[in-house]
Image: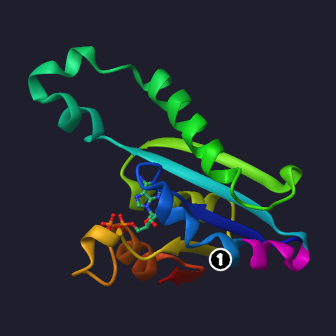
Amino acid sequence: MSKKILVPVDISEPELAQQVIPHVEGYAKQDDATIHFLAVIPDYTYFSAYGLGYTSIAPDAGEREAAAMGSLSEIIMKFSLPEDRVEKHVLSGTPKDHILQLAEDIDADVIILASHRPSMSTYLLGSNAAAVVRHAKCSVLVVR
Ligand code: ADP
C-alpha cells in the first residue's frame, strides 16, 4: 500500500505552510504517497472576529467551509505535487482533535507540520503541534 501523509495547515498563517513544502514534496516522492491536506476552522474564529454579541451575522458553517477550502487550495498550489495524489479536507472544531482523528481515519504513515507561528516564538512548539506530537500513533515530523 502506498504511504499516506497528513499535512495540517493553518489557513490563517499561509507563510507557515511554506516551511513544510520541501519536506512534503520529499516524502511525496516516496512510494507514490498520497498527501492529505487538512484545514480546521476553529470554533472561536467568528466569535472573536465579530464579538460574542454579533454571532448572528457570522456566515454559516457551509459558507465558512467553502471559503476555507478555497484558501487551502491556494496554499496547496505552492506545493509541487501530482494533483491526483492530493486530497483536501476542511473540518470545523478543535484543530488538534481533528488532526489526530483524521490521522487515524486515513491510517496516516506520517504527519508533517510546522512547529508554531513565528509570532509565538517563546514557545518552541505550539499547542496543536504539541498535542499531535504527544498523542499521534504515527510518526510526526515537526519542521522548524
Ligand atoms: P501556534 O499556537 O503557534 O499557532 P500551533 O500548534 O497551533 O502553533 O500550530 C502548529 C501547526 O499546527 C501548524 O503549522 C499547523 O500544521 C497545525 N495547525 C494549527 N492550527 C491549525 C488549523 N486550524 N488547522 C489545521 N492545522 C493547524
Q: Quadrant of residue 56?
A: top left
Left or right of 61? Residue 1 is right
Image quarter (top left, top right, bottom left or bottom right) of the N terminus: bottom right
Residue at the spot 40% in from the left edge and 81% down from the top edge = 134
Image check: 1 left or right of 49? Answer: right
Residue 143 shown in magenta: no
Amino acid type indicated by mark 1: Val
Whether residue 137 is situated above or below residue 61 in the rendered picture: below
Residue 118: image location, x then y, percent: 34, 71
Front residue of 76 and 129? 76
Instruction: Determine whether 47 is above or below 99 in the image.
Output: above
* Percent position of residue 102, x then y: 57, 57
Mark 1 beta carbon near ligand 1 (under 8 Å): no
State which region is magenta.
25-31
Q: Tell me the quarter of the picture where residue 133 sits.
A: bottom left
Q: Residue at x 20, y 33 (%)?
A: 47
Instruction: Give the colour scheme of this rendering.
Output: rainbow
Residue 47 shows in this picture: yes
Is residue 26 inside the magenta stretch?
yes
**Which residue is identified by label 1?**
110
| Local secondary structure at mark 1 | strand
Residue ID at (67%, 78%): 23
Quadrant field for ligand 1: bottom left
Q: Count how many numbered circles sit on residues in the image.
A: 1
